[in-house]
Image (cartoon, rainbow, N blue to C red):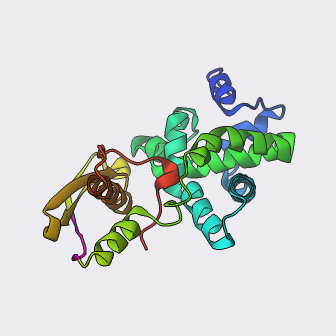
Amino acid sequence: MPAACQSLETHLGHTWRERHLLTQALTHRSHGADNNERLEYLGDGVLNCVVGLMLYQHFPDLPEGRLSRLRANLVNQDSLHEIARELDLGRYLRLGEGELKSGGASRPSILADALESLFGAAFLDGGFEAARAMIEGLFSERINAINPTVQGKDAKTRLQEWLQSRHHGLPRYTLIDTSGQAHAQTFHVECHIAALKITTMGQGCNRKTAEQVAATAAMAQLEGKKITTKSVPAANKAQPA
């Protein structure tokens, strides 16, 4: 592996003894048969276990259903893609020529899968505690930022319930524009609440995320907060109801 991987290991908090595991974790199937698909499967299981344990310990009073929704928000593709981008993971990936030319190093699904593969590789290299330490290092801040009074529901659901409880009409979400290359598009969505003459914008790596950002912005306006239209933190993202 290139020396640059030392920087990645530093950020992840784990230095691999079995270097081939790190190499495999960073190898996409387009590069060859010895790829990260099996490690991704293993890492997914470890990730769900560790994040579930972190939530269980951090929120001792929350019921199972709320904990499950919080975990789903934290380990979905959008969240993992965001963390992978923070790690600049794309620069370390081994991709086939076709994926390299088509921008695979920035594709959300490839980055999210590679991150889970690293969790699986850490588990095989250093055991559960090594993988747990890595995951905790990446997710602790996100879990600490969760407000359990609102995090059980996504922004679109909370906005809808707020409006319905006050007998207002539902918001309308409109896709305004898409930008960027096909493999890494940014979606721009407008949220319009006609009864209150409120219009907000949101953007994200897919339409669902952009709608959630726009809904978050609308809720913030209703609550008198200043907001931005950039993607919300990973812990706040969820699939719409």
Q: Position of residue 43 (x, y in %)?
A: 71, 53
Figure quadrant of the N terminus: top right
Does the segment drawn in magenta span residue 173? yes
How many numbered discs, if any?
0
Q: Check the image and report above or below for 36 versus 20.
A: below
- Locate residue 181 relative to residue 21 in the image: left or right: left
Q: Who's the residue at 44% across and 64% down the image?
A: 154
- Locate residue 21 relative to residue 112 in the image: left or right: right
Q: Quadrant of residue 2?
A: top right
Q: Who's the residue at 46% across and 56% down the image?
A: 237
- Locate residue 43 relative to residue 200 in the image: left or right: right
- Locate residue 14 relative to residue 151 in the image: left or right: right
Residue in front for this viewpoint, 18 or 94: 18
Q: Position of residue 83 (x, y in %)?
A: 54, 42
Q: Is residue 96 visible?
A: no
Residue in front for this viewpoint, 124 or 172: 172
Figure quadrant of the C terminus: bottom left
Q: Who's the residue at 65% across and 50% down the image?
A: 116
Q: Position of residue 11 (x, y in %)?
A: 64, 29
Q: Quadrant of residue 17?
A: top right
Q: Quadrant of residue 199?
A: bottom left
Does the segment drawn in magenta span residue 172? yes
Which contiguous range is marked in magenta? 168-174
Residue in front for this viewpoint, 210 or 180: 210
Q: Position of residue 232 (x, y in %)?
A: 41, 48
